[in-house]
């Protein structure tokens, strides 16, 4: 019985060591873990991520009111929406693979508000506001916001909200959104080592770029 108990407990440890080895020392420093450039490579809008780090998967950018439109970006296209006087927000979610934790380091993005669009923005991570600032009207402003907080695991939702618009037709567009952070191996629960082993066996690259 003691031998079986040791065997069961050793599997998460082995998987954790393999994940730590795959992450490597380069991931101890802040690096890009997720990026949206909103260009499909053919002159159109793409809401899916342009790039994701290994152990990170993310969905497309969405809008709470469901009214994303395609406007000119810094280069190429940008994601835009209206109704910023009505509690609207851009949202995206990422999932951190089992056995890994994400420590956020920063968020960079470009944005441009119309004359009647939002005058302020705020970012919430998993429902907690972590950054805010003023929007830029008439041209694109670039924000590079340091972030800090507890390590994130599993499914994490990001909400980029605008406020202060004077009319429902006021627009706000964003472009070149980049999330930076560091990935660290963490102990896996007993049932999680099989998934981690499958991920490792797939031989994923350290960073993958989505096809256009």
Image (cartoon, helix red, strand yellow):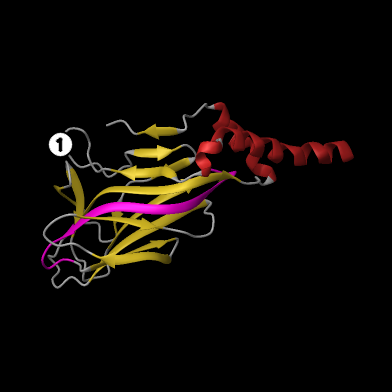
Seen in the image, is 42 located left or right of residue 160? Answer: left
Number of callouts in the render? 1
- Label 1 crowd (10 A; few <14 / some 14-19 / many >=20): few
Q: Position of residue 151 (x, y in %)?
A: 54, 54
Which span is picked out in magenta? 96-117
**Residue pointed to by mark 1:** 43
- Residue 80 seen: yes
Q: Quadrant of the C terminus?
A: top left
- Image position of 206 with respect to 30: above or below: above
- Residue 1 seen: no
Q: Position of residue 43 (x, y in %)?
A: 15, 36
- What secondary structure predominates along the stretch shown in magenta? strand
The image quadrant of residue 128 is bottom left
Q: Which residue sits at x=86%, y=36%?
A: 3
- Image position of 68 with respect to 36: above or below: below
Q: Which residue sits at x=51%, y=40%?
A: 27
From the viewer's side, name the closer residue of 140 and 76.
140
Q: Position of residue 109 (x, y in %)?
A: 28, 52
Q: Quadrant of the N terminus?
A: top right
From the viewer's side, name the closer residue of 207 and 210.
207
The image quadrant of residue 118 is bottom left
Q: Which residue sits at x=33%, y=46%?
A: 60
Residue 110 part of the magenta segment: yes
Seen in the image, is 29 located left or right of residue 34? Answer: right
Residue 192 part of the magenta segment: no
Seen in the image, is 92 located left or right of residue 99? Answer: left
* Secondary structure at numbered mark 1: loop
Residue furthest toward the right? Answer: 1
Q: Which residue sits at x=63%, y=42%?
A: 192
Q: Position of residue 49 (x, y in %)?
A: 33, 42
């Amino acid at each position: 019985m003691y031998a079986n108990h040791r065997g069961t407990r050793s599997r998460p440890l082995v998987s954790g060591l393999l994940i730590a080895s795959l992450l490597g020392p380069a991931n101890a420093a802040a690096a890009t873990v997720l990026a949206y450039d909103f260009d499909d490579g053919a002159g159109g809008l793409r809401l899916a991520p342009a790039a994701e780090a290994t152990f990170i998967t993310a969905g497309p950018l969405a809008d709470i009111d469901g009214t994303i439109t395609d406007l000119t970006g810094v280069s190429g296209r940008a994601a835009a929406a209206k109704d910023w006087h009505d509690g609207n927000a851009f949202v995206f979610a990422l999932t951190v693979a089992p056995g890994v934790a994400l420590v956020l380091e920063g968020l960079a993005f470009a944005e441009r508000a119309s004359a009647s669009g939002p005058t302020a923005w705020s970012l919430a991570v998993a429902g907690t506001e972590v950054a805010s600032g003023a929007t830029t009207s008439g041209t694109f402003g670039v924000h590079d916001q340091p972030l800090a907080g507890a390590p994130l695991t599993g499914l994490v939702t990001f909400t980029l909200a605008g406020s202060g618009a004077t009319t429902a037709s006021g627009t706000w567009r964003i472009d070149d959104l980049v999330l930076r952070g560091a990935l660290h191996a963490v102990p896996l629960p007993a049932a999680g080592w099989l998934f981690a082993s499958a991920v490792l066996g797939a031989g994923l690259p350290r960073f993958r770029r989505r096809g256009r």
